[in-house]
Amino acid sequence: MLGRRSVTTALAAGMLVSGAAGAKTIDFWIRAYNAGLAEPLVKAYNASHTDQVKLNLVPNDQFVTKLGTAIAGGNPPDVIAIDLIYVPSFAAAGQMENLTAQAKKLPFFNQLSPSHVRLATYQNQVYAVPFSAEGSVLYYNKGLFRQAGLDPNKPPRTWTEVYNAAKKITALGNGVKGFYFSGACAGCNAFTFMPLIWASGGDVLSRDGQSATLNTKAVKDALGFYRRMWTEGLVPSGAQTDNGANFINAFTSGKIGMTGSGAFAISLLKSKFKNIDFGIAYLPGQTSGWSSFAGGDSIGIPKGSKNVKEAWDFIQWTLSPQVQTEILAKNDTIPVRADLAQNKYSKTEPRFVTTSTAMAKGRTPYSVHYNELFNDANGPWLSMFQRAVFKGEIDQAVTEAQSRFTQILSTPAPGAR
């Protein structure tokens, strides 16, 4: 492994080592969404190693299908970075290499993102390690807070405070609204709405992921909280049909007081919307506390990889301090190691420290049926959300979702061994 100076020197010199005798080519698949992260990382690796990584950017919505097809066809990539929520199902299907021994030898294993490691673990064996990290937080427009007579240095810490702030900001008129969410986006509301439930003592699944736990006061109260803001016009009407296309775009208009989002929005707002003075806070509980959805990608080796050893060497390198700090943190990405969350770059942008803390202490539902339960546009999670928030049928929506969750969870995992 080269030090930072070596990596920098190699990059500056355009050092090319591909084609060296005995060099292996490591086929690396990742979602196109992560191109901005993966491209400089692979460039740095190839400039400093004999083995070379071939980056394959797969369209986001095709990744899981393409990977499953490649594995079934006996021609998988050597290494993949995949949304952490899908690791349990691939591990249960026996489609990932067991990395337990290698991973637990890492001296910083206990510093890795807990949610990533939890979802990468199936039957006490580890099948992946963290690659990229996200943590959901509450963004708020400090300029609108000032105009509404609110203290821009005191973001809301309870649902009542969110509601009161949203009401004052909406009263500014001229199309300004206090709050925003993408009402037709299943994943968006898993990322930003689910933490409100967790922070209030509720949950959506049992700890082992085997049972639905929707039929609780915490879930109904959270839905009622959004319902109240919707019916009182504190949320733009377009939110009802937003499938995620305006997940952050609404906030960038400068006319939204608060919205939930992830760390990725920090660099976007700083670089392209410099006129918006924004702050970041934790997603609050009903009366106290906070929570976050710990998201991102995990990196692992599919069964059938032709270069397992070389793939693991690459994976280890991605977790090194040089990569976590000089490539990820330097380019406005949260490190996946807690011991590197505070670094020389985060000191210049404390909002990244907030998102790192949110990620480190955040949660992620564990289920081999995650896609059917939470991501499917016709699935029970989004159906419950829409029926409760937009129609006001909270009890009926929760009862129906509890039943559909239970039915899905009673079926075997796709491809389970």
Image: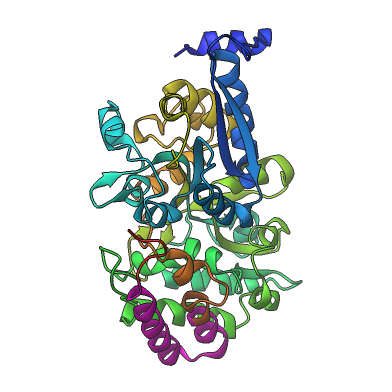
Q: Look at the image and name its color scheme.
A: rainbow
Residue at the location (41% across, 25% down)?
A: 309
Residue at position x 52%, y 76% in the image: 382
Tell me, yes or no, if residue 153 can be seen here: no
Is residue 395 in the magenta section? yes
Residue sitting nearer the eye, 71 or 294: 71
Identify whether 254 is placed above or below 313.
below
Q: Does the magenta stretch include residue 276?
A: no
Give the position of the N terminus as an image quadrant: top left
On the image, the x and y values in percent for residue 345 come to 52, 28
Question: Which of the pair 73/179 is nearer the observer?
Answer: 73
Numbered marks: total? 0
Q: Is residue 247 visible?
A: yes
On screen, residue 307 above or below 219: above
What percent of the width, then of the height, locates residue 391?
A: 56, 90
Judge from the rendering whether residue 349 lies leftward or rightward of residue 415; answer left or right. Answer: right
Picture residue at 45% right of the left edge, 55% below the top: 86
Q: Where is residue 243 in the image (x, y as percent from the top left)?
A: 65, 69
Q: In which quadrant will I find the C terminus?
A: bottom left
User: Which image quadrant is residue 158 in?
Assistant: bottom left
- Dominant secondary structure, magenta: helix
Extent of the magenta region: 384-411
Farthest residue, direction right: 174
Q: Residue furthest left?
A: 124
Which residue lies at the image location 51% right of the left edge and 90% below the top edge? Answer: 392
Picture coordinates of residue 356, whole percent (x, y): 43, 42
